[in-house]
Amino acid sequence: MKKFTLALICVNALFAASNEQIAEFYSQSIKAQFPDAKVSVSQRQKVANTGFESVIVSIEVNGQKEEQILFTKDNLVVPDIIDLKAKTSYRQDYEIKKFQEARENFTKNAKAVVEKEEMVIRMGDKNKPAIYVFSDPECPYCREHLKKIKEELKNYQVNYILTPVHGKSAFEKSALIYKETQKAKNDDEKIAILKKYYDEKIKNYPKVSEKEFTDALKLYEKYRSLGLRSVPTIIGD
């Protein structure tokens, strides 16, 4: 469940910048934090009109894989190439493309699953197109999205699936939201419950049972295994 983000370092001491040398260099810093990490170069190709090559470094820790990009030329390894004339960052372009591909894959993998999901907060007209919102009560972007829910309900049936990425308290709040919305009589009451636990000022809330916490955690793990990487993520018809 632990996410690892590893900064790439600009160096100028790799003689040929071979795949083995690059992997070995980054292994030293990565294994200081994650001793069992496996580091390898998974892809390498020329970057047009720059003289550089892009190198994809694959890092695996406890079954979780992360890929990061760097760029090499001669004996140099750098974290990014910025083209001022074109006003573009090669690293940013790669990350945007990777992010879009991940979302597309998740949508494809999860679409059939969400339609049968039981742990979901359903709101709106069943005759309208359905959208599924993967959200976290402690995510600032999710809080902003929640503010627009009544507008969304004008056009869609909105289904919330809570998949926190912010730790124990976020899972506890999610469990309480599921528990309390089951007793709600209408959408307004469900929205009020969501807003209560999404409020960043909330400090005290009811205790969550071990089963309630575990159920919320298992829900996250299910969609994580299908490719969910960030919140809010929205998929729909």
Image: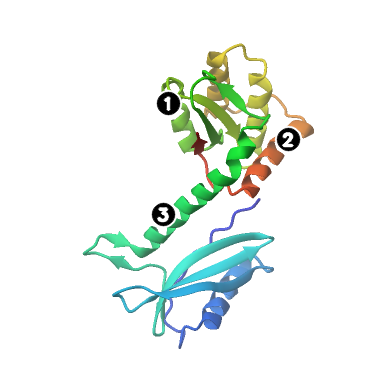
Packing grade of label 3 (10 A; few <14, some 14-19, many >=20) is few
Residue in view at x 64 percent, y 53 percent: 2
In the rendering, which numbered label is found on residue 148? 1
In the rendered structure, the answer to whether residue 41 lies left or right of residue 209 reads left
Q: Are marks 3 and 2 in contact (CB under 8 Å)?
A: no
Residue in view at x 29 percent, y 60 percent: 88
Residue 116 position, x and y percent, is 66, 32
Q: Are marks 2 and 1 in contact (CB under 8 Å)?
A: no
Say which element carries label 1: loop
Is residue 205 shown to the viewer in this render?
A: no
In the rendered structure, the answer to whether residue 50 lies left or right of residue 205 reads left
In the rendering, which numbered label is found on residue 237? none
Q: Give the CA separation, mark 3 to mark 2.
A: 32 Å
* Residue nearer the viewer, 95 or 201: 95
Say which element carries label 2: helix
Q: Are marks 3 and 1 in contact (CB under 8 Å)?
A: no
Establish if 209 lies above or below 62. above
Q: Give the CA separation, mark 3 to mark 1.
A: 25 Å
Residue in view at x 43 percent, y 75 percent: 45
Image quarter for residue 175? top right
In the rendering, which numbered label is found on residue 96? 3
Label 2 sits on residue: 215
Going by the numbered disc 2, the residue's amino acid type is: Asp
Going by the numbered disc 3, the residue's amino acid type is: Ile
In the rendered structure, the answer to whether residue 42 lies left or right of residue 216 reads left
Residue 6 position, x and y percent, is 53, 63
Q: Is tag 3's residue or tag 2's residue first in the polypeptide sequence?
A: 3
Residue 85 position, x and y percent, is 21, 64
Image quarter for residue 34? bottom right
Establish if 123 lies above or below 54. above
Q: Which residue lies furthest to the left in this view?
A: 85
Packing grade of label 1 (10 A; few <14, some 14-19, many >=20) is few
